[in-house]
Image (cartoon, helix red, strand yellow):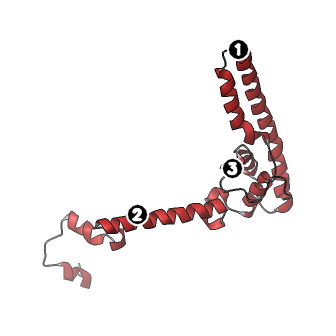
Amino acid sequence: MTSTPENSQKKGRPTPKRKEAQAATKVSSLAPASTKAEKKRSKDQARAARLLQRQAYLRGDENALPMRDRGPEKKFVRNYIDARRSIGEYFLPIIGFVLILSLIPLSVFAVAGIVIMYSVLLFSIIDGFFLSRKIKAEVTKRFPDKSTKGLGLYGWLRSTQMRRMRAPKPQVKAGDKV
């Protein structure tokens, strides 16, 4: 067995303890801050970086988007959905209304609320089915070489969110032509 120059430098001294070896391999930038001021500065920098990242995400910057939202076809689907109104985005407020109706002691209001809730749910599902087909047709027309897999569901799920709660934020107004 031949010794290499790096091995010969280590000979002649005891093997380091695990704690010492791990401490030696740590990168200085990953080491914890030692003073309160350094810890506070580190936290402030991390918070500022997170805020900038979130703002870029809400603006729709391509680099800040997660993989599920990236690509020109997904941007088109988001704009296509944001340019129209759908029954699905009113589902949550309607459920709130039904909840209030269910608190009224008369059973007629409770039954009416349940009928309204299930009617809106059914219309939302039907709208989602036809919306999914429209989205796939438009994407195929505009991006002939791209796959439409998952785009219909992506669009339908976005259409069921209240407009103000959507992320990334809508970049087109309702009624605009896409």
Who comes first in sequence, dot 1 or dot 3?
1
Relative horizontal placement of residue 34, taking residue 10 as reference (left or right)? right
The residue located at (21%, 68%) in the rendering is 20
Quickly name the residue at label 1: 107
Amino acid type at circle 1 is Ser
Q: How many marks?
A: 3
The residue located at (72%, 56%) in the rendering is 170
Relative horizontal placement of residue 27, taking residue 151 as reference (left or right)? left
Amino acid type at circle 3 is Arg
The residue located at (24%, 68%) in the rendering is 21
Tell me the quarter of the picture where residue 6 sits: bottom left
Quickly name the residue at label 2: 43
Quickly name the residue at label 3: 164
Cα distance, mark 1 to mark 3?
Answer: 34 Å
Q: Is residue 76 above or below residue 113?
A: below
Residue 126 appears in view: yes
Asked whether disc 1 touches disc 3, contact meaning CB atoms under 8 Å apart, the reply is: no
